[in-house]
């Protein structure tokens, strides 16, 4: 075998090895990228739910809603829901009216149309749930649970908003 | 052999470059839950509820029971601290019993308070365990 042939063979082996490795690397990269975008998509979806729940929870405990006296109006006149008579002081009348709303309207007016909502209010002194609305979501893995401190009937209470897809 | 070394070298460089690029994107672009917003909301809750319930007035008068009850009602993952400063600069610090040092994502809220003709500042601090 001449020297020129040996050089050619070395180049071809090198080329083949390189092509195989290159394909392997490209496929590995595509696989890892797919894994990353899938995970990121799940996390983004959870983050969107978290932010929506956070904003809805804040609106519920710190605002009166719009119109502010929505508890005295028919369903079609309600634009947004808030439960506060004053910031962090919940109104009994608004909570009672909230119970009369159907889930679709409630979720829509809270900006949570894509999610299921569960609301509870627990009295700290009595250590018991004094208000509950919606289906319990404790068995749902992908859910956001946010608790806020409020006063209800002049008593320290914990308001919990659970949101699930 | 020179050619073989050259292309393998280039391939290794490509692999490293791709991995670095991917790790950079994963690190920089990973979505992070904006939990500081919630921490800020909780700190504001404590400040509002404590003032409405008279827990701040009690604290100034030397009774921290009501404030500690409010702190205990917080979610388990959150720590709260109240730092009361009078106009002489004296500090009274009340921290939730099971919380010692700052861990992550500190949020603080300074509020003025007037009680029995005296001016106070209260710094509410919340952080995740």
Image (cartoon, coloured by chain):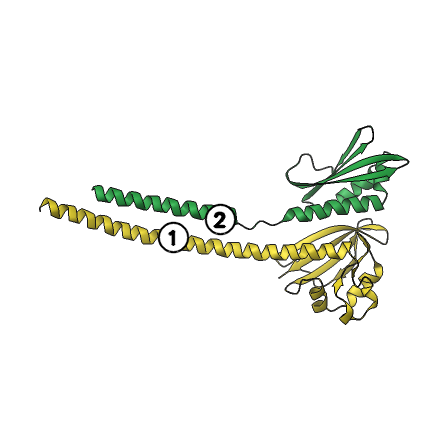
Chain colours: A yellow, B green
Disc 1 packing (10 Å; few <14; some 14–19; many ≥20): few
Disc 2 packing (10 Å; few <14; some 14–19; many ≥20): some
In the image, taking residue B19 as reference, residue A70 lies left or right, namely right
Q: In the picture, which quadrant includes the C terminus of chain A?
A: bottom right
Does the rendering let one see residue B105?
Answer: yes
Q: Chain of mark 2?
A: B
| Numbered disc 1: secondary structure | helix
| Numbered disc 2: secondary structure | helix
Closest to the observer, B18 or B99: B18
In the image, taking residue A7 as reference, residue A66 lies left or right, namely right
Quadrant of residue A81 in the image? bottom right
Q: Residue at x 40, y 55 (%)?
A: A30
Instruction: Find the distance from the CA under tag 1 to the CA under tag 2.
Output: 15 Å
In the rendered image, which residue does mark 2 sit on? B26
Q: Is residue B37 above or below residue A164?
A: above
Nearer to us of marks 1 and 2 is 2
In the image, taking residue A139 as reference, residue A41 lies left or right, namely left
Q: x, y percentage for residue B4?
A: 23, 44
Q: Residue at x 28, y 52 (%)?
A: A19
Q: x, y percentage for residue A146?
A: 69, 53
Closest to the observer, A67 or B71: A67
Q: x, y percentage for residue A59?
A: 74, 56
Q: Chain of mark 1?
A: A
Are the residues under marks 1 and 2 on the same chain? no
Q: Seen from this angle, which residue lies furthest right?
A: B116
In the rendered image, which residue does mark 1 sit on? A28
Q: Seen from this angle, which residue lies furthest left?
A: A1
Q: Residue at x 31, y 46 (%)?
A: B11
Closest to the observer, B42 or A126: B42
Q: Is residue A28 above or below residue A78?
A: above
Quadrant of residue A112 in the image? bottom right
Q: Is residue A81 above or below residue B40?
A: below
């Amino acid at each position: 075998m001449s020297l020129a042939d040996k050089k050619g063979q070395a180049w071809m082996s090198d080329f083949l090895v390189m092509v195989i490795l290159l394909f392997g690397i490209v496929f590995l990269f595509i696989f890892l990228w797919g894994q990353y975008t899938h995970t990121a998509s799940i996390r983004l979806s959870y983050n969107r739910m978290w932010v929506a729940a956070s904003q809805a929870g804040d609106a519920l405990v710190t605002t009166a809603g719009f119109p502010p006296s929505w508890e005295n109006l028919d369903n079609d006149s309600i634009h947004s829901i808030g439960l506060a008579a004053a910031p962090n002081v919940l109104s009994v009348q608004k909570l009672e009216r909230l119970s009369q709303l159907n889930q679709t309207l409630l979720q829509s007016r809270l900006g949570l149309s894509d999610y299921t909502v569960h609301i509870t209010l627990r009295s700290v002194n009595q250590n018991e749930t004094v208000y509950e609305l919606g289906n319990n979501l404790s068995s749902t893995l992908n859910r956001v649970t946010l608790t806020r401190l409020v006063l209800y009937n002049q008593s320290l209470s914990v308001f919990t908003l659970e949101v699930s897809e | 052999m020179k050619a073989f070394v050259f292309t393998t070298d280039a391939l290794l460089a490509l692999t490293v470059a791709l991995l670095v690029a991917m790790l950079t994107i994963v690190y920089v672009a990973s979505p992070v839950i904006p939990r500081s917003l919630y921490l800020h909301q909780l700190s504001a809750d404590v400040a509002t509820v404590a003032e409405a319930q008279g827990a701040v007035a009690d604290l100034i008068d030397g009774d921290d029971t009501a404030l500690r009850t409010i702190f205990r009602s917080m979610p388990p993952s959150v720590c709260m601290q109240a730092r009361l400063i009078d106009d002489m600069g004296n500090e009274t610090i009340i921290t939730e019993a099971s919380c010692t040092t700052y861990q992550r994502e500190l949020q603080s809220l300074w509020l003025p308070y007037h009680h029995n003709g005296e001016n106070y500042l209260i710094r509410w601090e919340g952080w995740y365990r």
